[in-house]
Image (cartoon, rainbow, N blue to C red):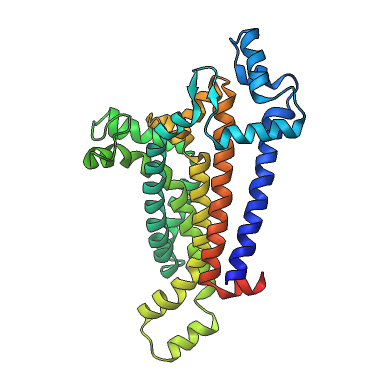
């Protein structure tokens, strides 16, 4: 197990390095023109552009530019020239809203995805299964900003059951929960439909395996067979899927939901920076989001190997 973890962490570091190089190339090298112009924004003066070129080392060889860029990102010294604000300070300010949204929605979609997937599998081919299949397809097919807009209109503007928009700090637990419930539901609906169908398929593939028939032959109750044997093994792919999806949500999947509900999180900050052609925040958020996906993928692989020893033996 130790050797597997070491190999997986080493491969993670290699991917992180390649990702940092690719991000640098996409933002600083591949586009035509002076990268200082893109960093400076549309209203920059020639003096500002010249200062940015010196600060970022754009008059230096490309490998020196890469090292300077990475140093700025990892030391938190990237400045948004449009707003004259430190990018990491803005990310830090928006991180509680983004983490609250991602964690709350993740708990909801995992719980209801497993619950509905299990129910659908146990009622396969029956009326309940067909209804859940239709609901899952609708949830998967409907964009999150449409779901959010509909929920806001019905439950906030028309009935005033929930607040229109905004984020309340977790120091006010009831207000925090009250303001995030609609965003949680909006973000979770897509994943609930997906997870329920994936788990249903896994359970139906597993339920007739030899070890399940052996457990039944030993006289174990149906509930014990389903929970301890069928569900436990069927959840392994779901664990992998959850890790990657959660990382993807943290890496930028909350942009639309944060914008619809005006949560002022990292995703909304990225959206505003893109709209303003403010390159430094987009550069930092893109790279950190990619890092989150890679790191979570490595952690999921390790958890996967703990749950299923065949994974580490095959690696």
- Quarter of the picture containing the N terminus is bottom right
Residue 84 visible in this rendered orientation of the protein:
yes
| Total labels drawn | 0
Residue 11 location (% of width, % of height): 66, 57
Residue drawn at the location 62% of the way across and 54% of the way down: 12
Q: Quadrant of residue 6?
A: bottom right
Residue 139 location (% of width, % of height): 45, 46
Camera-nearest residue between 284 and 190? 284
Residue 281 location (% of width, % of height): 54, 28
Residue 203 visible in this rendered orientation of the protein:
no
Q: Is residue 78 above or below residue 239?
A: above
Camera-nearest residue between 162 and 175? 175
Residue drawn at the location 59% of the way across and 24% of the way down: 279
Camera-nearest residue between 313 and 139? 313
Residue drawn at the location 48% of the way across and 82% of the way down: 212
Q: Quadrant of residue 315?
A: bottom right
Residue 171 location (% of width, % of height): 25, 39
The residue at the far bottom in this view is 218
Q: Is residue 91 above or below residue 9?
A: above
Q: Is residue 202 above or below residue 175?
A: below
Camera-nearest residue between 182 and 293? 293
């Amino acid at each position: 197990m130790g050797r597997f973890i070491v190999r997986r962490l080493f491969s993670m570091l290699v991917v992180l390095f390649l990702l940092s190089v690719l991000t640098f190339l996409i933002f600083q090298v591949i586009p035509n023109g002076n990268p200082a112009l893109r960093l400076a924004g549309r209203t920059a003066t020639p003096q500002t552009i010249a200062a940015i070129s010196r600060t970022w080392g754009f008059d230096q060889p490309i490998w020196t530019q890469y090292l300077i860029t990475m140093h700025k990102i990892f030391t938190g010294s990237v400045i948004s020239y449009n707003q004259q604000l430190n990018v990491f300070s803005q990310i830090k300010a928006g991180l509680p809203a983004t983490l609250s949204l991602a964690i709350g929605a993740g708990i909801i979609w995992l719980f209801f995805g497993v619950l509905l997937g299990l129910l659908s599998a146990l009622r396969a081919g029956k009326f309940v299964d067909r209804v859940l299949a239709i609901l899952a397809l609708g949830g998967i097919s409907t964009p999150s900003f449409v779901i959010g807009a509909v929920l806001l209109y019905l439950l906030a503007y028309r009935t005033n059951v929930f607040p229109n928009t905004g984020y309340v700090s977790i120091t006010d637990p009831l207000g925090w929960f009250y303001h995030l419930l609609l965003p949680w539901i909006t973000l979770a609906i897509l994943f609930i439909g997906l997870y329920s169908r994936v788990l249903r398929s896994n359970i139906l593939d597993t339920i007739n395996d030899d070890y399940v028939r052996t457990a039944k032959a030993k006289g174990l109750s149906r509930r014990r067979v389903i929970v301890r044997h069928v569900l436990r093994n069927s959840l392994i792919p779901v664990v992998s899927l959850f890790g990657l999806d959660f990382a993807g949500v943290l890496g930028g999947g909350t942009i639309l939901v944060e914008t619809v509900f005006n949560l002022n999180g990292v995703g909304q900050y990225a959206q505003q920076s893109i709209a303003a052609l403010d390159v430094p925040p987009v550069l930092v958020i893109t790279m950190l989001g990619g890092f989150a996906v890679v790191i979570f993928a490595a952690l999921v692989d390790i958890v996967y190997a703990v749950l299923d020893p065949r994974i580490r033996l095959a690696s």
